[in-house]
Image: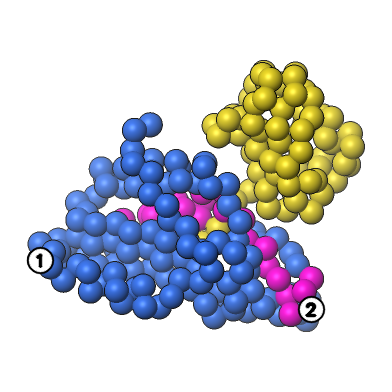
Amino acid sequence: MKVHVKTFGSLTDILEKEFETSATDTADLLAVLIAQHQELANRNLLIAVNNTVVHTAVELKENDQVALMPPYSGG
Amino acid sequence: MTQAIHNIFIQGPIPPGLVAESISKHSTKTAIGAHSIFLGQIRADQVDGKTVAAIEYTCNQDIALQQMADIRAEVFNKYELSCMHVYHSEGYIAAGEICFFVFTSAAHRKAAMAACEELVERIKKELPIWGKEIFEDESHQWKINR
């Protein structure tokens, strides 16, 4: 499935801020990105699909919006 | 979720005048007996001999505003509050400037103070906002909340 990915915080030093890619689920998406960018391995990341944070692997549908977010540091 | 979405984000630093204006706007609400205010200021941290000159804040606004609406509803349910106002900066905020403003009002001080503290802690922990600490030589590191 083609999905739209947005990255935030420190991830923007490693990945484009927005890109499209193909993945069947969120675990697959992460595995592909980690294979391309070793520095992503062992990072504590939060994933949101269509603006809802997910804590387990979620199946991706065509044109889903995926946000990859490192730990928050506002305030 | 059905809570109203309010935009809390301000481009650039929070002007000190906004704090004064916010206080003054509540003078007609005479059931209020206590305000509690938290102001976050950019600290010029020293890291390996370099000084933080500014923090550049970015956020995932859609998720942040939904999360803020949920927090707002929960804190209103938990405490006897009259009012709650929250502002957070986006963009480049220089050391010494204000980046975060939480303002709670209640009939009595304990509710205002406890709600204000809870809001500050929850916003720092639960809102998808990121701070990029920019040093005087323009190198950077990503802020980590303690």
Disc 2/disc 1 C-alpha distance (Å): 50 Å
Q: Is residue B71 visible?
A: no
A24 to the left or right of B9: right
Q: Residue B88: x percent and y percent?
A: 47, 61
Indicate whether residue B130 is drawn in magenta.
yes
State which quadrant residue A37 falls in.
top right
> In the rendered view, would you say A8 is above or below A21?
below
> Which chain appears blue?
B
What subunit carries mark 2? B
- Classify mark 1: helix, strand or loop: loop
State which quadrant residue B142 falls in.
bottom right
- Chain A's colour is yellow
User: Which residue is label 2 attached to?
Assistant: B137
Q: Residue furthest left?
A: B30
Q: Which of pointers 2 and 1 lies earlier in the amino acid sequence? A: 1
Q: Is residue A7 visible?
A: yes
A63 to the left or right of B100: right
User: Which residue is label 1 attached to?
Assistant: B30
**Residue under the image location 42 percent in, 52 percent down:** B7
**Residue under the image location 46 percent in, 53 percent down:** B123
Q: Residue B129: x percent and y percent?
A: 57, 53
Name the amino acid type tagged 2.
Asp
Name the amino acid type tagged 1.
Thr
**Residue under the image location 29 percent in, 74 percent down:** B21
> In the rendered view, would you say A31 is above or below B122?
above
What subunit carries mark 1? B
Span colored in magenta: B115-139
Determine crowd level at label 2: few under 14, some 14-19, many 20+ residues with C-alpha closer than 10 A: few
Indicate whether residue B112 is drawn in magenta.
no
